[in-house]
Amino acid sequence: MTSLAKRLLTAIVLIPAVVWIVMYSSEPFFIGVLSLIVLIAGYEWAALSAVKSKLYKSIFAITGLLFSFGLTLLNEPFLSGFFYASLIFWLLAIVLLITKAQDLLANKVARPVMLLIGYLLLGLIFISLYQLRLNFEQGPELLMYLLLLMWVADSGAYFAGRSFGHHKLSPLISPGKSIEGVIGGALACLLLAFFADQYFEINNGTMFISVSVFVAFVSVFGDLFESLMKRRVNVKDSGAILPGHGGVLDRIDSLIAAAPVYVACLLMTKLFT
């Protein structure tokens, strides 16, 4: 079976399952699936951090999940501050990924620092999806919309990049990504956001559309960040659990950046309060 056939078959299976889990599953089931995703992603992150032992990778994954659950115990002001800090982190990360790609690739990062970053990123994606699904009005719809944004941004970038891509976004980290692709993805999300605004019946549609396009833009750099991590250890995929798609981190790389930024923007703008 070709790689493309494997990708298509995996997508055909996964997409309906994801839609059902996000929109219709019970809260315990959703939390269980989210926990499994974070657990596997933690194992893969440990491998990207040059942890060789399966035991130590498993310990990191388990403690990362425990840290993630610990975040659910934070009070609302502290948790909001955590999301706002993640927004600042990703804005700084975007600047560095654009301007300091060579340094990011060349400079060594101590393993404890890599693992600490992993704890924070895994915790953020867990608490972001947890908060969206369980604690926001229209939570399942908002989470489904975030996933649609990621899928549309990725598809728009792919087709625009293939058709018009001439200027590389970051040739050192991800030669396949182009500036034209990013613009194409953003325009596709602009169209999606226009229709989503009608669905959600939001008073401030301009703000909602602006947030949507901004989150789609940020998602590109979640993907680029994971590509940086893989390039630093010379691997193509974070894992091999999903046929044709690589590892779990390869599937949620955009969400690593987009999910906490999305929640931070919703909290700041109070669009759904």
Image (spheres, rainbow, N blue to C red):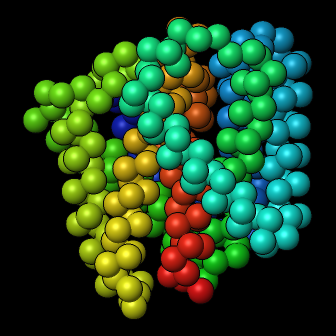
In front of the other: 113 or 188: 113
Residue at (38, 54) in percent of width and height: 216
Coordinates of residue 118 in the picture (x, y in percent): 72, 33
In front of the other: 42 or 169: 169
Coordinates of residue 154 in the picture (x, y in percent): 34, 44
- 4 up-or-down from 148: above or below: above
Residue at (20, 48) in percent of width and height: 184
Q: Quadrant of residue 51?
A: top right
Residue at (53, 9) in percent of width and height: 106
Quadrant for the C terminus, please: bottom right
Quadrant for the N terminus, please: top left
- 91 up-or-down from 132: above or below: above
Give the left or right position of residue 143, taking residue 130 as reference: left
Q: Which residue of the protein is positioned furthest toward the left in this rendering?
A: 164
Query: Is residue 214 shown to the viewer in this render?
Result: yes
- 60 up-or-down from 271: above or below: above
Coordinates of residue 6 in the picture (x, y in percent): 41, 29
Give the left or right position of residue 22, taking residue 58 as reference: left
Give the left or right position of residue 79, taking residue 245 as reference: right
Coordinates of residue 231 in the picture (x, y in percent): 50, 14
- 115 up-or-down from 12: above or below: above
Residue at (28, 76) in percent of width and height: 195
Query: Is residue 17 shown to the viewer in this render?
Result: no
